Image (spheres, grey):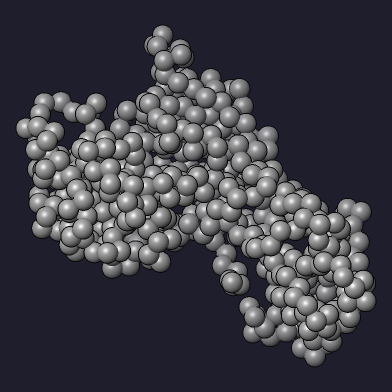
Amino acid sequence: MKILLNAGQVRAAVDELVGQMAAATPAGTDIAVIGIKSRGEILAQRFSQKLTDKLGRDIPCGALDITLYRDDINDPHGKAQPTVRSTEIDFNIDGLIIILVDDVLETGRSIRAAMDALIDLGRPRAIRLAVLIDRGHRELPIQADFYSCKVDVPQDESVEVSLVETDDVDQVAVSKG
Amino acid sequence: MIRRNTKFNWKRKHLLSLRDLSRQELEHIFETAKGFEQFSTRSIKKAPTLRGKVMVNMFFEDSTRTRISFSLAASRLSADIVDFTKKSSSVSKGETLIDTARNLEAMGIDIVVIRHNAGGAAKLLSRSINACVVNAGDGFNEHPTQGLLDVYTIVKEKGSLEGLKIGIVGDIAHSRVARSNIWAMTKLGAEVTLVGPPTLMPAKVDQLPVNVSYNLDDVIENLDVINMLRIQFERMGGNPFPSVREYSHFFGLTVERAQRAKPGMLVMHPGPINRGLEMESEVADGEKSVILKQVANGLAIRMAVLFLVNQAAMQEGKK
């Protein structure tokens, strides 16, 4: 296992992303942050708190479960069995600029699922994508608007993001298999 | 709230009875159902999860709630639905249950939801065909999705079943709902008391993990939940009680009895209600009643069940 980012670097990466998002948000536009369960949800909460401080107004935060929209759910070659959890978005997304948050961007398939799930909830003005790590190997034409680091990780290795809220430590590691 | 990832692999491609399920499996169904609850309030009440799958409703007995609830659950998950009723099918020409199901399967169905007047019909079917089988009531045996939605409703209202005192009142002998209830409730830590006249108690009641009372007035003040069953006249032979008025005098949930109960007692009924017989209208529509919440929760439970059995079938196909 190789550590890609330690706790301090994760914190710096979050701050950097918040800076990028704030800079890309013209005054007076309504934005909201929505994280993909489960690591994206935690990141989204950190983003929304920091954006609220930075922009001086409340930036709503929500969590999206994409299990029902995954394209591998009826695929006999799919990996593990996903668990359905709840989507928790207690505001109307119509007309908002939604910043969709995930920890790692790889194939782009979860982002496709997330966009479908969001559009079933309403009609946002725009959807932007923010990720902590972009590791390549895209299978769909999807790119991040905001990312803190791009790394080339071979496909047989996995990038694991740990966050204090669920894993007791902030770090990003690369491990074999 | 952020939950830690709990990995649980659901392995059953059939849902036949709650007697077979472990506590962990019951809790996994509830956890999954929670994810489906918000569907009814969304602008688009549909997800593409079961797109291209076909569910057949095979109902050999009448039903309103269960059949519509399964249909709606399947359509919210984008499955296609075939409705089958005994009257308008070749069953009236003498075709057997298994032949009928095999023929349907040859047309490519994925999930069979079956209600039948013979106990064990769903189990028999699950051994004969490859499609997923979901029991929607078999004779006096079980009605697992009703049991699940009853327990899920209690969990949502009370937080947990641990230590709750639950009364199941009325026609226990003819009730598959009661059996599914007993298995699920006791597995989750509740203390169940069956209440009714001796003629409406099931055979071998002493072998069930329950208390038995023949007097509702003795127990009403201690109950946290009361589940009133319907008197199933259509299944009765002989005269289990002298008159309907006498039954409701001794075992009906009247306004007066409901007032003697704990303030937070939940009043439940699996429907359809015989108003004025097992329950007075004021109680059925009163503030203690969660009868319509049961129906709403049933939809989330059935979506969860369809989702899970399909998932297990997909995993099985992988091997």
Given the current orientation, which residue lies at the most extreme top position? B93
Quadrant of the image containing the N terminus of chain B: bottom right
Vertical position of residue A123 compared to residue A10: above or below: above
Res. A80 image quadrant = bottom right
Please state the horizontal and vertical placement of residue B216, each as a whole percent of the image.
13, 52
> Could you tell me which residue is drawn at 78 percent across and 77 percent down?
A57
Vertical position of residue B291 compared to residue A62: above or below: above
> Could you tell me which residue is drawn at 30 percent across and 64 percent down?
B264
Please state the horizontal and vertical placement of residue A148, each as a whole percent of the image.
89, 77
Q: Is residue B78 left or right of residue A157?
A: left
Vertical position of residue B225 compared to residue B302: above or below: below
Residue situated in front as seen by the camera: A22 or B198:
A22
Q: Is residue A8 left or right of residue B182?
A: right
Q: Is residue B288 left or right of residue B216?
A: right
Vertical position of residue B295 compared to residue B221: above or below: above
> Could you tell me which residue is drawn at 73 percent across and 84 percent down?
A170
Given the current orientation, which residue lies at the most extreme left position? B242
Q: Is residue B102 visible?
A: no
Please state the horizontal and vertical placement of residue B283, each as a whole percent of the image.
27, 49
Please state the horizontal and vertical placement of residue A103, each as a whole percent of the image.
78, 71
Given the current orientation, which residue lies at the most extreme bottom position? A8
Q: Is residue B160 visible?
A: yes
> Could you tell me which residue is drawn at 37 percent across and 64 percent down?
B158
